[in-house]
Amino acid sequence: MATVESRTRVHRLEPTPPADQVWSMLRTFFGRQKRRFLIAASALDLHPAQAGALMHMAPGTQLPMTELAQLLACDNSNVTGLVDRLEARGLVARQSFEQDRRVKHIVLTDEGVALRKQLLAQIGAPPPGLGRLSASEQRQLADLLGRALDGA
Amino acid sequence: MATVESRTRVHRLEPTPPADQVWSMLRTFFGRQKRRFLIAASALDLHPAQAGALMHMAPGTQLPMTELAQLLACDNSNVTGLVDRLEARGLVARQSFEQDRRVKHIVLTDEGVALRKQLLAQIGAPPPGLGRLSASEQRQLADLLGRALDGA
DNA sequence: TATTGTTATACTCTATAACTATA
DNA sequence: TATAGTTATAGAGTATAACAATA
């Protein structure tokens, strides 16, 4: 935890107001997306944490429970109950991992894949504002964001 | 991981729409910011929902409880307990509203303002990746995002 | 009658600690 | 000894329904 915090801290030589402005705008996007996410999760009868967990499970991948706990920034013990309920609802399954029998892999069931798809249909679509930029502006935006994301 | 994601979208008639690409990148930012938010809240002994509520309270503003519930995308009844605990900790206060005596306004206390500032210091700083763009690129990014946000 | 905020209930999340089974 | 996952416990979030006070 403290390691992650200190890793994100950067000392800049000079203040960069444009970056602050960009970040402020991105946080506006973030706030809107968060509400959109909560509403979409509720509509699918998913607790926010459950919906968040599903979002971290790409179809076809095997996710160790410890890794899921790290992605959710919570304790391992929470994941047990979380997965219990998702499993009871038939959305995910536990798979034992023969190479290390302490580990259990979480995988989406077909039903889980379908529900995740519904969730993505509601929160995965770009907000209308992006569509008002021209195609070349959108490509420009993608390029800038891509470079800002690289190794960040 | 990314390989599985992209496998789900092989069937496309035209090259990846730039808006989808931009939105995908923004969602990557959101995911990282969400973890950053959870870690920062935990460090200040705030439950995620409590930290989220504080973020919606600008210092000096009076926020009706119903409005807070809408911002948090949750039921009014949840806000009662949430505010109870923030109030017990001395971070916010309830103010009766004389124009409509059904309404109660939530305001930050001085201590609440200070804690909110600490929270913002941890999640309000731009991620390091943005600093690697040149100043003119950052301004370009701010311009594009600003127009995408307008009226969205 | 409708709305604001509260209470009551049941379920879920979250952190901590102790435990097991593996390594 | 260390790690992955579980269990137990206590405190907090969340949705629903019913309620009192006010509009």
Image: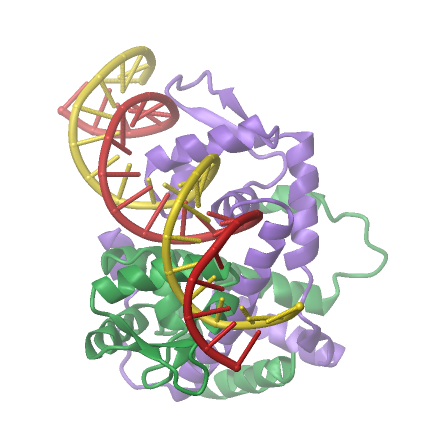
Chain colours: A purple, B green, C yellow, D red
Q: Nearer the viewer, residue C4 or A101?
A: C4
Q: Quadrant of residue B13?
A: bottom right
Q: Is residue A2 visible?
A: yes
Q: Quadrant of residue D7?
A: top left
- Total labels: the figure holds 0
Q: Is residue A49 above or below residue A152?
A: above
Q: Is residue B133 visible?
A: no
Q: Position of residue B142 (x, y in %)?
A: 53, 84
What residue occupies the far right of the structure in this picture?
A: B13
Q: Is residue B20 above or below residue A131?
A: above
Q: Is residue A4 left or right of residue C18?
A: right
Q: Is residue C1 left or right of residue B1?
A: right
Q: Residue at x 57, y 87 (%)?
A: B143
Q: Residue at x 36, y 73 (%)?
A: B124
Name the image quarter holding the C terminus of chain A. bottom left
Q: Residue at x 75, y 65 (%)?
A: B17
Q: Is residue A27 above or below residue A51?
A: below
Q: Position of residue A133 (x, y in %)?
A: 71, 81
Q: Nearer the viewer, residue C17 or B82?
A: B82
Q: Quadrant of residue C2?
A: bottom right
Q: Nearer the viewer, residue B61 or B35?
A: B61
